[in-house]
Image (spheres, rainbow, N blue to C red):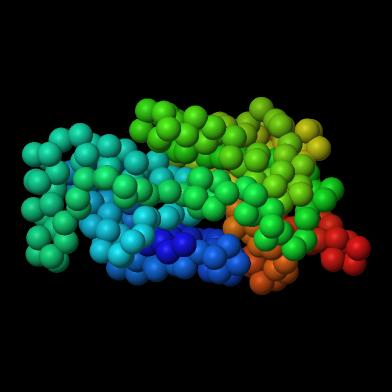
Amino acid sequence: MRVAYWPGCVSRGFTPELHGSTAKVAPLLDIELVELERANCCGAGVVAEHNQELVDTLNARTFAMAQQVEGAGMMNICSTCQGAQSECQQRLDADGAYREHINSHLEPEGLRYEKGGEWENKNLFWLLVEDIGLDALKEKVKRPLTGLRVAPFYGCYVVRPTSRLGYDRYPDRDRYLDWIIDAVGAEPVAYAGSHKCCGFPIITMNKTTSLRQAGRHLADAIDAGADCLVTPCPLCHLNLDMQQPDASKFVERELGVPVLHFPQLLGLALGLEPKELGMGKHVVKTTEVDAKIRELAAA
């Protein structure tokens, strides 16, 4: 499968282990990544709040570049990018005159976004279920993650609003992470915060509320018996992993639970080692997960 690959700016900056692990995992899943190296930020957050036309132009530019990759849809590895880009695409596809106006900004580069059709932009975990299939994934698993209890953290941008995220065609998208965790041999852990906001969008405006949210979700996962969390969103990862030591102060308890990027979990099941997947770069050490992987390898 060939995809126009949009890694997002966070995975190439704050969380390079996400970008690196995706590059390692993709060929094992028979995914050919055609990276959109000149693509720009999706504009989620500050840009989107202040200038809708600018953010729509930025995303239309990325879409137009992706549409130049023959025979390929677009794949991203960030729930926040998915949400922002889905919102933009919905506006562009709904209004031909507005789409033409946005395309006029792309003319100097010889780019043009054409309305949908069969072309889609999907997060890796959507693509894995819908285009590759869970049965195919199971066949590729070299190291079933038996005994590893994994709490999924979806990131709110891929679970709502359902009206712009394809839930009319794929109503179970809010269960895919659980299905994938099960497919790689691990045990999905149910807990209260799996589909809630991590708190990152308000970290600069209200740090207390943001870290209290993150800490509560982490504590709920721990209390449910999770060995680790996994998320398809690098911004969620920043709040749940990088900010975890501070979050523990706001919930007044020790946390210390590892948070994996989604491709890292896949990589472990596909036979890659923690070091290859950049798991040593996390703020919260993945020592206990690494130990379980070594036990599985020995077995």
178 or 169, which is in the foreground?
169
Task: Name the spot of residue 201 as percent of width and height, x first.
Answer: 45, 40
Residue displayed at 39% across by 68% down? 35
Task: Name the spot of residue 39 as percent of width and height, x first.
Answer: 31, 63
Residue 182 left/right relative to 106: right
34 or 191, which is in the foreground?
34
The total number of labels drawn is 0
Residue displayed at 54% across by 32% down? 172
Task: Name the spot of residue 71 as percent of width and height, x first.
Answer: 33, 61
Where residue 86 sits, quadrant-wise, is top left
Question: Vertically, is 53 above or below 159?
Answer: below
Task: Name the spot of residue 272 as percent of width and height, x first.
Answer: 70, 68
Q: Which residue lies furthest to the right in this view?
A: 299
Residue displayed at 9% across by 60% down? 107
Q: Which residue lies furthest to the bottom in this view?
A: 276
Residue displayed at 43% across by 54% down? 76
Where residue 174 sits, quadrant-wise, is top right
Residue 299 left/right relative to 123: right
213 or 280, which is in the foreground?
280
Residue 69 left/right relative to 157: left
- The answer to whether residue 186 is visible is yes
- The answer to whether residue 253 is visible is no
Question: Vertically, is 230 above or below 225?
Answer: below
Which quadrant does the C terminus fall into?
Answer: bottom right
